[in-house]
Each structure stands twice: as structure tokens, then as C-alpha cells.
Image (tube, grey):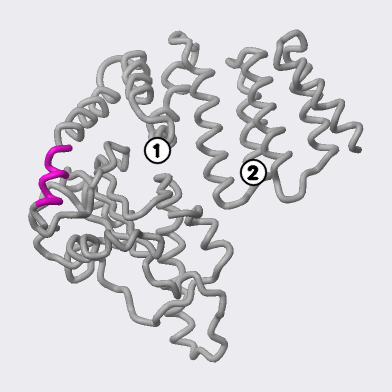
Amino acid sequence: MKKNLLKLFSIFTVLLAFSSCSKKTDEFGWYYNFEDAQKVAQSKNKGILLFVNSIYDSPESYNAVKLITESKEFVSKLSDFVCVHFDFSDPNIFQANIPTDLTDDEQKAFEKKRAKYEKQFFTADKYVIKNTPTLLMLTKEGYFVSSINFDYLSNSVDGYVSKIILEKDSLQELNQKVALTSKGSNLDKVKAIDELFESQDELYRPLLIDLYKKIPSLDKENSSGLVPKYIREIANAEAFESLIKFDFESAVNTYIKAADDKRNTPEDRQYLYTLAVNVESNSFNPNIEKIISLLNQAIEFAPETEDAKNLNLYLTEIQKQQ
């Protein structure tokens, strides 16, 4: 997919059919609501498969996408997984025209469908889906396991199912690492969470926030030395949630609040304020006075660092512009 999905949704208003969506799965067994699928996965101890296709798919993949998503056989052969499908292939979902002559019932149906797509776009952004078709394997908690690399040349469901089965060892391995995060002493848990975090690709580490958010309270005295690291990571994940909603102010405040934790070193606090400066500088309407204030505070935390020198240079340039 060539553009950020959530950004597309913010630019274009969804134009949709007014059909009801009361069922949680389609006729082929695919869920369309990720949260519903995750609840089932957790209750039945299953992995999750998230498949996304769109209007940007290559023509060569069309038959394969149809084979995978319109076959009860595909889902039934993967009984160890809960399957979720986001279908963004209808060009109408990106049209700007909004119906103006809807009845009350049609308006409600329209809003319901629009909410459905908005949630799907948000989830696709969360999993950093940039190209489609894409199939991700996830744990029941929604943690990233792998991206299944299809060549989309097979003419049988079994051809695609077999590639998924080959990744089950990776799912089991990650599940074992997740299990260790709730065993032993508090410091054992902190160490296990850190090992899980480091094992994940950087793109998918924010998905672990429910785990590493526990570290500051598990290690109140910072005995592990890891607390500042995860204060920073928590702030990054929370700021990301704000930024994909284009809420720059909340993202800035997230970094400022994180910097106030006394377990941070002066350098940590300087770094967090630098991130706040970066967000404010790249917002839709940068507040120059606020940027200058944040820069001054960042420099004051650790004025002798190399970062402080760079911040002073930026401050000088900003003041010239002002």
C-alpha cells in the first residue's frame, strides 16, 4: 500500500453500502473486527492471522486473494488460529463525495460502516502495514510473530496454508517468551520483558506496551537499571498513539510528563524534551515560543553534552527565524 492507511482515511470520507454488520464473521469465517477476534483468540488460546488487501494490490495477487478470503476451506484448515480480514479493495471507500439525501436509518448505517473502516485503518497503522496484500501472524495478545511471505502463485488453498504452518514454531517460541514475563520475582519479570522487547523488530515493539508499561512499578528503585529505558519507550508508544490521530499536543505533553520521573538521568530528561521539540516542530501549526521554551529546558538538564550543543544551534536558528 503506497500511503499510510489512517492518513488516507483522514483525507477521504468513506462512502459505503448501507448493509447491516451484526455478524462478527463473514460467510467464510473471517472476522472483520480485530478486537472481537482477539477476545476469541485469548479465550481459546489461539494465534491470530491478520490478512489485509487493498486497491493497491498487484494484479498478479488478485486470484490468490480471492482464493484465500472466499474459501471456507482456508479458515477451517487453520483451526489453531483466529482469522481477521481487512478488505480495502473497494475504491469507493476513498471517495470524497458524501451522500446528502440519507434517511435516518441510512445515516446510522453509514456511520456504523464508517466506524468499522476507521477501526480497521487504525489497526492496520498499528501493525505498520504499508504494502498489500499482507498476512501477519500474531500471538493471542496481538504481538507480532512474523509476516507470511506468499508468492501468490499457488492455485490451491493448501499451498498457502502450508506456509502458515511452517511459522507455527515461531509462534510457540514467542509464546514461551511471553509466559516468562509473568513468572518469578519482580526483577525476573523485568528481565523477561526486556528480553522479549529486544527480540522484537523495532517496528513492532510498541505492541508490547501492556507488558513494558509494568516495568516502572515492578522496579521502583530501578535495581535493574532498565527503568529510564522503559519510561522512554512507554512515552514513545503513547506519543505514537496520539500522532496517528494527529494529536500533536498530547504527544508533546506525553514526553514532558515522562521527563518528570525522578529515576531519569539528566541526559534522559534532555532526550525526552528533545523528542517533544521534534513533535512540536513537525506539527501542523508549530508554536515558536513553545519550541524555544522546550529547547531551553532541554539544554538546562545537561548543558555539557554533545546533544546540548546541537540543541543550542537549533535554538539559535529558531530565534533568528522568530
Q: Is residue 253 depicted above or below 36 in this figure?
A: above
x and y percent of residue 124 in the render? 41, 52
Q: Residue 250 bears which disc, if any?
A: 2
Quadrant of the drawing holding the N terminus: bottom left
Region in magenta: 159-167
Q: Residue at x 19, y 28 (%)?
A: 173
Q: Please identify the quarter of the rendering in which residue 154 is found.
A: bottom left
Sooner in the amino-acid sequence: mark 1 or mark 2: 1
Q: Secondary structure at mark 2?
A: helix
Residue nearer the viewer, 251 or 14 = 14
The residue wearing badge 1 is 207
- Residue 36 appears in the rendering: yes
Residue 70 appears left or right of 52: left
Disc 1 residue type (three-letter):
Leu
x and y percent of residue 111 in the render? 47, 74
Specify whether residue 165 is painted magenta.
yes
Residue nearer the viewer, 65 or 248 = 65
x and y percent of residue 108 in the render? 46, 80
